[in-house]
Amino acid sequence: MALLQISEPGMSAEPHQHKLAIGIDLGTTNSLVATVRSGMSTVLQDPHGHALLPSVVRYMQDDQIIVGHQAESKQNEDPINTIASVKRFMGRSLKDITNRAHIPYRFVSNNESEGVSQGMLQLETRAGLKSPVEISAEILKTLKLRAEKVLGGELTGAVITVPAYFDDAQRQATKDAAQLAGLHVLRLLNEPTAAAVAYGLDNASEGVYVIYDLGGGTFDVSILHLSKGIFEVLATNGDSALGGDDFDHRIYCWILDQILESNQTKHLLNEEDTRLLLTKARQVKEWLTDNYEAQITCKLSNGYAVDVTLSTDEFIELTQNLVNKTLSPMRKAMRDASLDLEDIKGVVMVGGATRMPHVRHAVQEFFEQEPLTNLDPDKVVALGAAIQANVLAGNRSDEDLLLLDVTPLSLGLETMGGLVEKVVPRNSTLPVARAQDFTTFKDGQTAMSIHVLQGERDLVSACRSLAQFELCGIPAMTAGAARIRVTFQVDADGLLSVTAREETKGIEANITVKPSYGLSDDEITNMLKSSFGSAETDKQARALVEAKVDAMSLVSAINIALEQDGHLLSTEEKGPINSAITRLEDLLNNEDNHAIHDATEALNTATEQFAAKRMDVSVSRALAGKNINEVNL
Ligand code: ADP
Ligand code: MG
């Protein structure tokens, strides 16, 4: 038994220690960091007072890396080395990037033998090949540094948000980026869920909420169900190529039209002019959110002076169809979740672009209710992430917040002829377990290849391959007679495990599937094969680690006790304790968990008397000067 520790009467055994935990919104256009201070979730600013960090990373000549506003301003000047919107490439292969012609970066596949598996893409910059994970890590490092400076301490961990539709590979890439940035990921949290948490909907009564998120380049709609503090994502939909940038582009085109009209002759704009006008367009869009009219004045490189005025009415006319484009994903999500308008209890607005009044108006008309807008729409995700981080770091143990997610894509198995049989349909609430029976194809077949896939399509070639493994030792029977039960299980963190079991003899094989990005099928198969044979080694390794941890915590507790109450012992009494400590410490470099365990026990025995003495002293201290009735024993 370890030493009994007794605290001062009236003092809690462990003084409450506030752990520093942060929430990060790693956005396509802007990223933010927030934390809970004095019970309030707050966004942290840089020394210039900026909360938003543009998600742009620039690799400089001198190995320097610049992140944020400064990098953003060089985007057109140095496009190849200035990477924006890298979130779009997270966990993606070259094959996944369809409109490469419009993107100025030099893409490279890290697995040149394309087609075998998804080789993760990389970008060629003057600092060498950079993966989206490394580039995102630069953004995360910048925010981590900001948080450490403002909070003045070491961070316990971070909650990082991801879009609800992110698949396994994209989530894993986000986690990898955080690890590379030196952050301990407490959990990945879906962006819409974070927004709902920020609005305190977890304290609201049960109901269904819609999260409408229009950012810089993406539109996402999510439908959440909330009951007794549990969030479930019922459906997600959106448009990955629709956002505030499209509104800028409409204004930019309008300005060009005005120039052409007034000038008659055609103007050829150079890159600098384009950049200037796009920046102006963005400013005009944001200005018109609070003002009726915007004047645009600037000089083009050929000396032509632009001077035009855009009214809100004209702006609405130019962009109303962009707003209307968000309606169809909303209808689809409602249909996916089998909901009617009257089922919707509230609508939350997220993303800087939802500040535009005609966007708000359209959402209000669609849902026939006023959306929630009192929190800053581009900060709300980070604010919610910080609240969740605070809970997970243990600062609010009394009220726990359980968040449930759904599978963003269906999970299934390959069957004969290269077809996919879905076992877990998309949008299933996590955790989920589903089983399905399969059978053999040939007479006397004794093995079966299990190929796990993710996706909505029916053909194996159109789905993402997650893993492949074999079930051997099936008794020889006629084709179709064997019963193989395959069970898919996805835990609360989204990790998938698959078990295949032959029912007559009870032979079983099971695996935990890792997302396959960056790995070939062979590598995964090997990984899985080795996982079958390594259970025993894993068990031993775990026992050793546990023994060492126990030993170290006992030694440190005894050292503290000796420091405080060492005077209770004579030198002769201290001798055996010290030698038991030395013996145990020596063994810690060993790999023998039994020896460590025995030495830990020996140290416990050597300190039994000391523990008793400390207890006596503490009790008499507590009793000193008090009537026995006053003491709560
Ligand atoms: P993301 O989620 O893609 O990182 P944000 O939520 O930060 O993006 O949204 C960025 C978009 O919001 C940009 O297109 C920006 O111009 C737009 N935006 C920010 N403020 C306003 C405003 N006041 N009015 C209109 N649009 C705005
Ligand atoms: Mg966002």
Image (cartoon, rainbow, N blue to C red):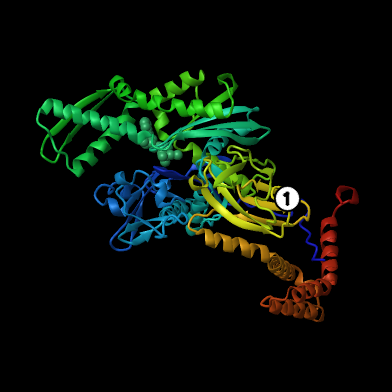
Q: Quadrant of residue 240?
A: top left
Horizontally, is 329 left or right of 473 in the view? left
413 shown above or below 426: below
The residue sitting at 55% across, 55% down in the picture is 184
* Furthest-right residue in this view: 628
Q: Is residue 320 visible?
A: yes
| Residue 156 on image: x %, y % | 57, 54
Horizontally, is 599 left or right of 404 in the view? right
Q: Quadrant of residue 577?
A: bottom right
Q: Mark 1 = which residue?
A: 482
| Residue 232 on image: x %, y % | 62, 35
Quadrant of the image where one finds ligand 2: top left
Q: Is residue 296 visible?
A: no
Q: Total label count?
A: 1
Q: In this orientation, which residue lies closer to the viewer: 600 or 408? A: 408
The residue sitting at 76% across, 80% down in the picture is 579
| Residue 209 on image: x %, y % | 57, 28
| Residue 302 on image: x %, y % | 10, 39
190 shown above or below 129: above
Q: In this orientation, which residue lies closer to the viewer: 616 or 15? A: 15
| Label 1 residue SS | loop
Q: Quadrant of residue 308?
A: top left
Horizontally, is 476 left or right of 186 in the view? right
Q: In this orientation, which residue lies closer to the viewer: 39 or 605? A: 605
Label 1 neighbour load within 10 Å: few <14, some 14-19, many 20+: many
The N terminus - image quarter:
bottom right
Q: Indicate the amino acid at tag 1.
A: Ala
